[in-house]
Image (tube, rainbow, N blue to C red):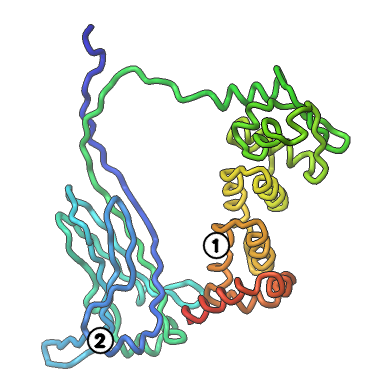
C-alpha cells in the first residue's frame, strides 16, 4: 500500500517581541571602567541569546577637538543566526515612576545576518545623566524593547490527523454520571460518590486508604470532616479531569484551601496550579501571610516567589507594617533571615 502522506513546503515569517528591564546599581563605581563594555543583562528571544551592554564613560571628540563624555548602550546578538533577522531596538531610561522622555529614549532598526552588536555610541552626555531624574540612589533603570522578525522554511508532511486524547473528558463524564461508583464521601450534610481505583491511581493517600491496611480499605463510606464540601468536590473533579470545575470562580481563599487539600492528598500538580494562582494575588498586605502559608505547606516555588517579592525594591518596608509580618517573624525566623540577606544583596 502506498504512503497516503505528501510533503508541503511552508515559508513563514514570525514576529517575536519582549520588554526587558535592567537595573544598573552602583553606577558611580562603574565609572572606573571608562569605555570598557560591561554586560548589564542577558535574555532570550526568537531562539537566540541577546545581551545588553553599556560603557559608563566614553570620551568622544568633535571636529574641533572638543571633548564630551557619554554613556553608551549596545545590543549584542550572542548566538549565530541561521537566517537573517530584522531587529527593531528601542532603549529608554526610566525614572522612579517608570516613565521616560524623548531625550532619554533612542531607537534603531538593523538586519542581523550574523552575531554581532548594534547600539547608541552617544546615548546621553554623562554630565546630563548625573543631573537627571534617571540616576537615583546611584542606580539606573533601563528598559530594552526588542522586536525580531525572521523567516523560516520547513517541510510539512500532510497526512491523517489523529485526534487528541479524550481520556480526561471520559473520566469527567464518569465522575458526573456516578456510574460504577463504589465509595461515598460524607461531607457534613452533603455526599459525593467516586471510584476507588481512579482515586488510588491519582493519589498516594487514597491508594493507601483504599488498598492498604487502613480501615477505609474495607468500607465504601468515608467521613470527611476537615475539608469544606466545595473544596473536596473541586479536588475530586481535578483528579478525574486534570482541570478545575468549569465555570468555577476560584478566589484566592479557595486556592489556599485547594492547595491544603492537594498537599494532604499528594496531588502535586494541583498544588502548583493553586500556588500559581496565589502568586497573582500577592501584594504588600498579603505577602507575609502568603509566605508563612507557603512555608507551612512546604510549597517551595510559592515560598521562593514570596521571598523575591518581599525582598524586591522598596517593598520590604511596606510588608513590615502589614498585619501578617509579626506572625511571619515568629513562625518563620529562617525565612526572615533569607529575605534580609537578599535585600542586603540588592541594596
Residue that numbered label 1 is attached to: 305
| Residue at x 70% of width, y 24% of height | 176
Q: Is 320 placed above or below 4 here?
A: below
Q: Nearer the viewer, residue 279 or 233?
A: 233
Give the number of callouts: 2
Q: Is 86 placed above or below 241 here?
A: below
The disc, 1 or 2, on the residue closer to the chain's N-terminal end is: 2
Q: For the view shown, which residue lies furthest in the front direction?
A: 213
Secondary structure beneath label 2: helix
Q: Is 347 placed above or below 158 here?
A: below
Residue 162: give x, y in percent of width and height.
Answer: 40, 20
Residue 197: give x, y in percent of width and height.
Answer: 64, 26
Secondary structure beneath label 1: helix
Q: Is residue 120 visible?
A: yes
Residue 92: give x, y in percent of width and height.
Answer: 37, 71
Badge 1: few (under 14), some or many (20 or more) residues near its Cα, within 10 Å? Answer: some
Relative placement, left or right, of 293 versus 192 is: left
Residue 199: give x, y in percent of width and height.
Answer: 65, 31
Which mark is on residue 150?
Answer: none
In this view, the mark in front (1 or 2): 1
Q: For the view shown, which residue lies furthest in the top direction?
A: 1
| Residue at x 22% of width, y 43% of height | 151
Badge 2: few (under 14), some or many (20 or more) residues near its Cα, within 10 Å? Answer: few
| Residue at x 67% of width, y 77% of height | 320
Which mark is on residue 33?
Answer: 2
| Residue at x 35% of width, y 89% of height | 28
Q: CA distance from mark 1 to mark 2?
A: 34 Å
Q: Quadrant of residue 297?
A: bottom right
Q: Is residue 247 visible?
A: no
Q: Quadrant of residue 35?
A: bottom left
The quadrant of the picture occupied by the N terminus is top left
Amino acid at each position: 500500500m502506498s504512503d497516503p502522506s505528501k510533503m508541503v513546503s511552508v515559508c513563514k515569517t514570525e514576529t517575536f517581541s519582549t520588554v526587558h528591564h535592567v537595573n544598573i546599581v552602583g553606577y558611580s563605581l562603574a565609572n572606573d571602567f571608562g569605555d570598557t563594555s560591561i554586560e548589564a543583562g542577558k535574555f532570550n528571544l526568537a531562539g537566540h541569546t541577546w545581551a545588553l551592554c553599556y560603557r559608563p564613560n566614553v570620551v568622544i571628540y568633535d571636529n574641533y577637538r572638543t571633548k564630551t563624555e557619554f554613556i553608551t548602550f549596545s545590543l549584542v546578538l550572542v548566538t549565530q543566526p541561521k537566517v537573517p533577522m530584522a531587529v527593531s531596538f528601542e532603549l529608554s531610561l526610566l525614572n522612579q515612576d517608570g516613565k521616560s522622555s524623548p531625550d532619554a529614549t533612542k531607537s534603531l532598526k538593523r538586519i542581523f545576518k550574523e552575531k554581532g552588536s548594534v547600539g547608541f555610541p552617544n546615548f546621553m552626555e554623562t554630565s546630563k545623566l548625573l543631573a537627571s531624574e534617571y540616576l537615583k540612589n546611584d542606580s539606573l533603570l533601563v528598559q530594552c524593547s526588542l522586536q525580531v522578525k525572521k523567516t523560516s522554511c520547513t517541510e510539512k508532511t500532510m497526512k491523517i490527523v489523529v485526534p487528541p486524547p479524550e481520556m480526561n473528558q471520559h473520566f469527567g463524564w464518569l465522575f458526573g454520571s456516578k456510574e460504577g461508583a463504589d465509595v461515598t464521601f460524607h461531607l457534613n450534610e452533603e455526599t459525593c460518590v467516586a471510584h476507588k481505583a481512579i482515586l488510588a491511581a491519582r493519589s498516594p493517600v487514597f491508594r493507601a486508604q483504599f488498598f492498604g491496611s487502613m480501615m477505609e480499605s474495607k468500607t465504601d463510606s468515608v467521613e470527611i470532616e476537615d475539608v469544606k464540601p466545595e473544596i473536596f468536590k473541586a479536588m475530586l473533579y481535578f483528579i478525574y479531569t486534570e482541570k478545575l470545575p468549569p465555570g468555577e470562580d476560584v478566589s484566592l481563599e479557595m486556592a489556599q484551601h485547594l492547595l491544603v487539600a492537594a498537599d494532604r492528598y499528594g496531588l502535586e500538580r494541583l498544588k502548583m496550579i493553586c500556588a500559581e494562582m496565589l502568586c497573582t494575588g500577592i501584594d504588600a498586605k498579603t505577602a507575609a501571610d502568603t509566605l508563612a502559608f507557603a512555608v507551612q505547606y512546604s510549597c517551595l516555588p510559592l515560598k521562593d516567589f514570596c521571598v523575591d517579592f518581599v525582598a524586591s525594591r522598596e517593598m520590604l518596608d511596606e510588608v513590615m507594617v502589614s498585619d501578617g509580618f509579626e506572625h511571619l517573624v515568629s513562625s518563620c525566623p529562617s525565612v526572615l533571615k533569607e529575605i534580609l540577606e537578599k535585600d542586603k544583596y540588592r541594596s
